[in-house]
Amino acid sequence: MEKAHDRLKLIRKHFKLSIRDFAKSIYFSHGVYGQVEFGSREPNPRIIQLICSKYNINKNWILTGKGEMFTSEPPDIRLEKILEIYNTVDDNLKDCLLEQSKILLKIYKNK
């Protein structure tokens, strides 16, 4: 029978994230989160709440397996990754990224 830690692994795999990246996204060490996912440590309420908030996950589904995994449409993780990149560069490169995005969109629309 599937347990909460199995469902947590399903969530992480759905978003195609490593344990390290998933743990980082919810502000936990990968060691602690890894123990939770492997079932050697119980998921505490804070981990569950952070996952539910960040990824729009149904808390009842994590705890019981009942209901739907998502409370709404899952967030597009690609947008978050684009924002992470954008936030690491200077203003000149931000302007360049914006212009390149506009060009790519125009090319896409003209297909």
Image (tube, rainbow, N blue to C red):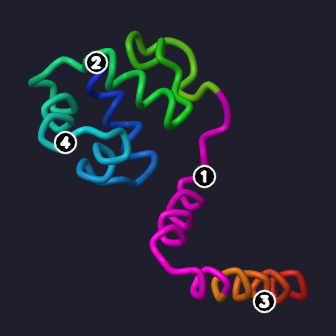
According to the picture, the residue beneath numbered tag 1 turns out to be 76
According to the picture, the residue beneath numbered tag 4 turns out to be 29
- Residue 109 in the figure: left or right of residue 57: right
Q: Is residue 83 above or below residue 70?
A: below
- Amino acid type at image mark 2: Lys
Q: Is residue 56 magenta?
A: no
Q: Nearer the viewer, residue 71 or 1?
A: 71
- Amino acid type at image mark 3: Ile
| Residue 108: image tag | none
Q: Quadrant of the C terminus?
A: bottom right
- Amino acid type at image mark 1: Asp
Determine the image quadrant of residue 41: top left
Q: Residue placed at 88% from the left, 81% from the top?
A: 109
Q: Which residues are magenta?
A: 72-95
* Residue 62 rendering spot, x and y as whole percentages: 41, 19
> Local crowd at mark 4 within 10 Å, few (<14), some, or many (≥20)?
some
